[in-house]
Image (cartoon, coloured by chain):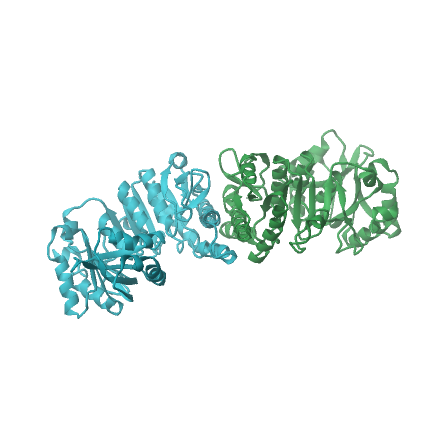
Chain colours: A cyan, B green
Amino acid sequence: MSLIVHKYGGTSMGSVERIRNVARRVAKWHAAGHQVVVVPSAMAGETNRLLSLAREITPQPDPRELDMIAATGEQASSGLLAIALQTQGVSARSYTGWQVPVRTDSSFTKARITAIDGDRIRADLDAGRVVIVTGFQGIDPDGHITTLGRGGSDTSAVAVAAALEAHECLIFTDVDGVYTTDPRVVPEARRMSVVSFEEMLEMASLGSKVLQIRAVEFAGKYRVPTRVLSSLTDPLIPLEEEITSGTLITFEEDEKMEAAVVSGIAFSRDEAKITLLAVPDTPGVAYSILGPVAAANIDVDMIVQNQSVAGTTDFSFTVNRNEFQRTIELLKRDVIPTVKARELVTDDKVAKVSIVGIGMRSHVGVASLMFQTLSKEGINIQMISTSEIKTSVVIDDKYMELAVRSLHKAFELDQSPTEKA
Amino acid sequence: MSLIVHKYGGTSMGSVERIRNVARRVAKWHAAGHQVVVVPSAMAGETNRLLSLAREITPQPDPRELDMIAATGEQASSGLLAIALQTQGVSARSYTGWQVPVRTDSSFTKARITAIDGDRIRADLDAGRVVIVTGFQGIDPDGHITTLGRGGSDTSAVAVAAALEAHECLIFTDVDGVYTTDPRVVPEARRMSVVSFEEMLEMASLGSKVLQIRAVEFAGKYRVPTRVLSSLTDPLIPLEEEITSGTLITFEEDEKMEAAVVSGIAFSRDEAKITLLAVPDTPGVAYSILGPVAAANIDVDMIVQNQSVAGTTDFSFTVNRNEFQRTIELLKRDVIPTVKARELVTDDKVAKVSIVGIGMRSHVGVASLMFQTLSKEGINIQMISTSEIKTSVVIDDKYMELAVRSLHKAFELDQSPTEKA
């Protein structure tokens, strides 16, 4: 008998019939003797409906009240799931974030979990109940309702699993696992049965939407074994089959994992590139440029600064394409007059492609194979950025699919690790 | 400067535009220097939508989970109202029942308020904020969410007003006050500017849907001056005008009130009559008949038992028409074999008509005028029941409108108290 946390997304909870299916699946786990805690999202579309009502009143609603409103979506879906479970003869009880309580800081609409009290959940589990905990929300030190931001239910689930020292956290979603790259771009993309936490972190932050990056961070921090698997299978598929399906995020590096030098290709088209040419290279220039950008709450992704030549340097960075115009205006107004760059060069038609693999740590020539592959295809690399386990390049966005496909083939990701060995 | 509680129903909160109007009205009171607490209902239709989802899963959902689900409607509307107020430049904050907290017993779906802690609300009021408190809900001693049942927001508002010792509780609704009878039946029906608590209690319990009976009881217990008034007027009508509009429920009997012998005519068509003929009249017979009915959670309204003749008595009572079939089955199975009634006579085509007036206490001949009026119209009275301030009759339901109209005229309710004097 193990303690298992299940998380179901908005699509899985999208209608009464789907909630019934979730209940069937949970009941199956419960009947097999497991203690189950379920963290559901709001019914698909509900959070958007609620936020639209608020934005109809004003484009900039008060975050505290926004959380008050948005938190109701998960509260309702959790109650519905409890009822669906009871209808299947399973004793079940739902709790909101504040009832558990799930304690957070006071950053409304993007709060961070600080602590979870597992006592109440454990008492119900020990009484034989399935416990449902609303995803996405918590309570701050002053007793206000907070939400964790978009996709926060993933984080809730992993955090609950950590607090209860669960055997595994199962993230049920509308894909059947983590792939070497997006199967819509590369039909040969292969589902990984295991992925390391570090790789998952890079994949998540690089635009692979399977699992929220904060959830991955949480899983890493507390070493919560987390599995991404499909909620679209028959809810009554045999437990033995389900228990090994999907992709498991692990924290142990065994030989098999070392063997995979590159595990996956991540990519993102939501990029825009900004370069300040010939900036006089004085100490603090990076801060002079990016300080005002950060202060305006604009998220900067890649940052590249080259060796200075004749006392000046070229400084490039990427931002989300939605923030492109705002960033340019800001730079022209607040930055360029100060740092005295010669020229501003911008391009919002770029894409970022990254190879990710824990094996890169100990293997040379990985980046080189990437550059060679792109060169063969005649794709010009505009920016390069590397970390221990990934190499990212910025390229013209019209070549993005071509780059992903050729890299996927070059690193033999269409073959299973066994075939390669 | 006074502390005023406003309550707005689901229709008043029914859309973003209507919520804006509520905010305009509240802002007007706030600008005039009043401390305002607002208790809103859920947006019209929302509670039904939520309960339908639950009933789609099972016809008999768990009450605890039903409350979890239903309570979200007011939480969302409260947040929306706070945002709308802020947009008007008014500092505002919304609280759920558990945040205040509004403490209740554990009778899910029909909980009763046991205590309200006013500290948190008072602190916000003193900081210059308008405070919004979700209607309809509270928290039980174990920290579960409870709801007060249909129309519970009226009770919430009056209870909050009592806890804060508010100057007045304003129930904004889609009618402009309490009438001598339903204007749809009697076009001459007149709005009362003042009605006594006792009369309101009788009016509310007799089918006048303006204000929930539990709210009236609460108002009486804590002597909360409560005013029923229209939310359909221009939200910016002058405060002096609004402050005296509608109908005020008072606890002081002045001469003017004594003058009105009969204040209003209440009626209800949801009645069904059941008579057990020739029941052997032994001690405890009433309990033998009504005990099983109460145990089956069927609400009994009027009860009439006549003087026994030759050791037997006829025992009549009325139930809601929806419970008619169930009551008959129950009587045939569990009651009649025991009490040995000779015959069961039933009629589900009856209506109840009542005259209500605090002046009846000290005036003779009031009931007599009622019987005379009905007799003149050829309406047969099937049952009579009286209390200190009302007289109710059960009649064939096809005569209901005729009875109400003729009684309204006979008691000169179409004329203002001044005209009569």
The image quadrant of residue A90 is: top left
Does A234 sit left or right of B57 as displayed?
Answer: left
Task: Say whether residue B41 is visible.
Answer: yes
The residue furthest top is: B283
> Residue A179, percent across and down?
25, 57
Is A417 left or right of B98, judged from the image as shown?
A: left
Which quadrant does the N terminus of chain A fall into? top left
Q: Is residue B303 shown left or right of residue A121?
A: right
Q: Is residue A136 above or below residue A281?
A: above
Residue A280 placed where, x, y %?
Answer: 22, 58
- Name the quarter where the C terminus of chain A is drawn: bottom left
Q: Foreground residue, A263 or A123? A: A263
**In the rendered view, would you say B181 is above or below A378?**
above
Out of A22 and B37, give the one closest to the viewer: B37
Residue B272 in sight in this render: no
Instruction: Return the x and y of residue A198 as percentages of the image width and height.
Output: 22, 49
Question: Who is closer to the viewer here, A18 or A382?
Answer: A382
- Percent position of residue B387, x then y: 78, 37
Task: Please name whichever residue, A24 or A354, is drawn nearer the observer in this view of the structure.
Answer: A354
Q: How many marks?
A: 0
Q: Is residue B213 left or right of residue A74?
A: right
